[in-house]
Image (tube, rainbow, N blue to C red):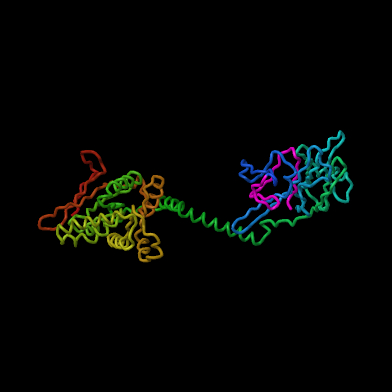
Amino acid sequence: MLPLATGDASAPQMVPCSPKFKDGRPYPWAGDVSNFILYPESANQTVYSKMTNPRDGGNYTCRVRNDSHAYQHTVSLQVIDAVRGYMGAPLPTYDLPDEQLVQLGSTARLFCEAFVGSIDLPDAQSEITWNRVGMNSSYLEEQKRFTLRSVARENNQVLGAYLTIRGVRKEDLGPYECRVANAGDQAILLKLWLREAEPSEPLNNNPKWRQLALAAIVLLAVAIALTAFRHRLGILALFCRQRLVQPDLQDGKDYDVLLTYLERDSGFAAEMLSTLKERYSYTCNAYQIFPNNDCDIAQNLRDAAQRSRRLMVIIRPSLAEALSGSVVMNTLGGSALTDRVSALQDLDDVECWDSSVLASLLQQLTRIHPQPVCVSLQALPQGYELRDHALASLLRIAPVIEWNQKKSLWFKNWSLLRLRLPPLRTKTSTPSGSVAIVCPGSRKELGTGKVVTTVVSSRSRRSTPSINDSLEILV
């Protein structure tokens, strides 16, 4: 049985919970059973009546259930005549537990409450107090750690009392009683035992929790270290490399980087060339590939790459076909050439690389230059590290940087790229040179079959060439 509820016939009464039963009868109730109705403002979890009568008394039950559990709560309501008043013994509205647990040194709070009613007499007075069983009535008053506070509600018809004990000691444990007396000298005693609760073991004294906490800390540290290695250690390595490693200017190479790209990536390539030269002081050469050109692109690119320390390629799937099929397709005639261009464009429209196409392209690039660096605007195949070991080995030789064109990732993209380029030149060691745009021509020299390639310097924007500008003819 849960707390006993009482009330007089003149005051509104509310009983929480839903659905409702009164003496086993479900809601709604007829007038001869109960005048209580649902209280909408409490989401139908309360029943109330503005005016009660003796028929409203009884046991009100709330039943709550889900798919696996059911719970029932019953409140007993006793209706008292407000005119005659209540002359009986106090009725507890809160059932004390048999015992209450508290840890030594903490604060304990004991509470009791009872309905005492009201009697219209001048000297009638009800009282409620706490006492320690076996001690005199002044014991609690003498203890400075003990505080007694009385409360009242329902026009002083319901009295309650809190006993607060701060810094509980061993001698404070034991039986306590709450005494409630009404104006008619009728009294009840409500008792409970205050007992010591077993102290909860601190985390650092529990071997199991200590091991779990240590394991969690280690895992967190490893995760932080891996994150830092991925996002910050590369920046540290780049800083040390640029400061400690000097470029080899006596290796017989004319350029630091040869940037190779398809015609559709010319705008992106121009931005990269400008950044490489103006921001990082690299000497660069450029080679633009026309897939429909009737020349041996792979051989021409190999000849140009021999003059550069790194071959940087903006790769697309169609580049693999351009490098491997340029000579063969020249023998098929003009009709086959149109079909080839259409097929190359279809390959470039996919969002993700095909493993076989990427492996074929990387193999060709490693035969053209020993240190190719690839920049891809398309995503690499997912899970290739586990499925395609040959591709994973090629990517270690010819690394591919998935270039994200978001401005927020600009620094990350260039940090990854510069780690694979030659060391940064200082201002005093930067030799004079040209940033060239190389355009393979579409005509042949008579009788030779060789393609004439014109290199136009873009280092100077002046109309009159200076001594540092160059005009080169690659044959």
Measured as percent of width and height from the top left, residue 321 is found at 25, 59
Part of the protein shown in magenta:
1-30
Q: Residue furthest right?
A: 136
Q: Is residue 63 visible?
A: yes
Measured as percent of width and height from the top left, residue 255 is found at 29, 52
Kindly indicate the quadrant of the structure image that contains residue 329: bottom left
User: Quick check: is 317 in the magenta stretch?
Assistant: no
Give me the residue at 67% from left, 54% from top: 72
Q: Residue furthest left?
A: 447
User: Quick check: is 22 in the magenta stretch?
Assistant: yes
Report the number of discs. 0
Q: Residue furthest front?
A: 32
Residue 291 sits above or below residue 426 on the image: below
The residue nearer to you, when weighing 359 against 414, is 359
Measured as percent of width and height from the top left, residue 119 is found at 83, 37
Asked whether, in this view, residue 200 is left or right of residue 355, the answer is right
Q: Is residue 433 visible?
A: no
Asked whether, in this view, residue 75 is left or right of residue 319, the answer is right
The residue nearer to you, when weighing 287 against 18, is 18
The residue nearer to you, when weighing 120 against 158, is 120
Asked whether, in this view, residue 460 is left or right of residue 419, the answer is left
For the C terminus, the quadrant is: bottom left
Measured as percent of width and height from the top left, residue 204 is found at 66, 57
The residue nearer to you, when weighing 453 against 410, is 410
Residue 188 sits above or below residue 368 on the image: above
Asked whether, in this view, residue 34 is left or right of residue 300, the answer is right
